[in-house]
Amino acid sequence: MSSDILKVLYSQDDIHAITARLGAELKHDYAGKNPLVVCILKGAIMFMTDLVREIDDYMELDFMDVSSYGDATESSGEVKIIKDLDASVKDRDILIVEDIVDTGRTLKYLTDIFKTRHAKSVRICALMDKPEGRVVDVHADYVGTTVPNEFVVGYGLDYAERYRNLPYIGVLKPEIYAAKS
Ligand code: PRP
Ligand code: MN
Ligand code: MG
C-alpha cells in the first residue's frame, strides 16, 4: 500500500523533530497548570501520543471524536460530535491537539464549545496548518509545520479510513482518488 504514496512529505525523523520542539514549548507554557489535553479523534491520535511523551509534567488526557469529512477529500462543512469528552472542561486549561487545520471548521466548532462550557483557557496545538484551505477564521497557537494545499495522509490522517497507520506523512497518487470516484 505504500506504493499508493506519490511522495513522502515528512519522515518519522522529521515528525519527531517537530514533536520534540512543540513538547518543549508546551512543557514551558503549561508548567504548573495541569492542562486537559484533548485529542481530536481519529486524525490526531498518533500526534497526541507522541507529543505528550515529550512532556514530563502533570496533565490529563481526554479524547473527543468529531467528524466533518466522511469519506470525501473535501469538507462537508458539517461538524458532529461522535464521542464527547469524559472530563469537565469548566475552569480547566484546555489544549486541543489536532493533526491538521484545513477549513478551520472543526477547530472553530470545538473552541466555541469549550468556551461555552466555561474553560479557563483554550489553545490549539496542530501538527499541520494548511492556510490556503481556511474558510472560517481560526488559528492554532502552536503549529508543527505549514503544508501546501495537497491532500496528505499517514500518521493518523486518512483517505476513506485508509493510511492512518503509516509512520510518515505523504501525498497520495492522484489515481487513488480517481479509482474511488
Ligand atoms: C480531519 C482532520 C481534522 C479536520 C480538519 O478530520 O483530522 O480534524 O478534518 O479539517 P477542517 O479544518 O476543514 O475542519 P476528519 O473530519 O476527516 O475526521 P478524522 O480525524 O476521523 O479523519
Ligand atoms: Mn480529524
Ligand atoms: Mg478524516
Image (spheres, rainbow, N blue to C red):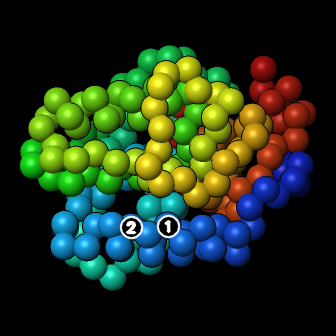
Q: Is label 2 in contact with label 1 (beta carbons under 8 Å)?
A: yes
Image quadrant holding the N terminus, namely: bottom right
**Residue 167 location, quadrant:** bottom right
Q: Secondary structure at mark 2?
A: helix
In the rendered structure, find residue 75 and report the number of the disc placed on it: none
Give the residue displayed 49% in from the left and 67% down from the top: 22
**Is residue 62 visible from the viewing direction of this image?**
no
Residue 174 in the image: above or below residue 164 = above
Rendered image quadrant of residue 85: top left
Amino acid at pointer 1: Leu
In the rendered view of the protein, which quadrant contains the C terminus?
Answer: top right
Q: Is 101 left, or right, of 26 in this rendering?
A: right
**Mark 1 lies on residue:** 22
Percent from the top left, x then y, of residue 164? 61, 52
| Residue 10 drawn at (x, y percent) | 74, 61
Q: Is residue 44 above or below residue 102?
A: below
Residue 125 visible somewhere in the drawing: yes
Can you say whether 2 is above or below 106 in the image?
Answer: below
Residue at image point 64% right, 28% down: 133
Number of marks present in the image shown = 2
Between 175 and 135, the residue placed more toward the observer is 135
Q: CA distance from mark 2 to mark 1?
A: 6 Å
Q: Residue at x 35, y 73 (%)?
A: 28
Name the side, left or right, on which 71 lies relative to 65: right
Judged from the image, the secondary structure of the residue bearing numbered disc 1 is: helix
Ligand 1 within 8 Å, label 2 CB: no
Residue 177, x across and y down, in percent = 80, 30
| Mark sitting on residue 26 | 2
Q: For the residue marked with disc 2, what is the amino acid?
A: Leu
Q: Where residue 169 sits: x, y (%)?
A: 71, 56
**Which residue is most to the front?**
29
Which is nearer the eye, 129 or 153? 129
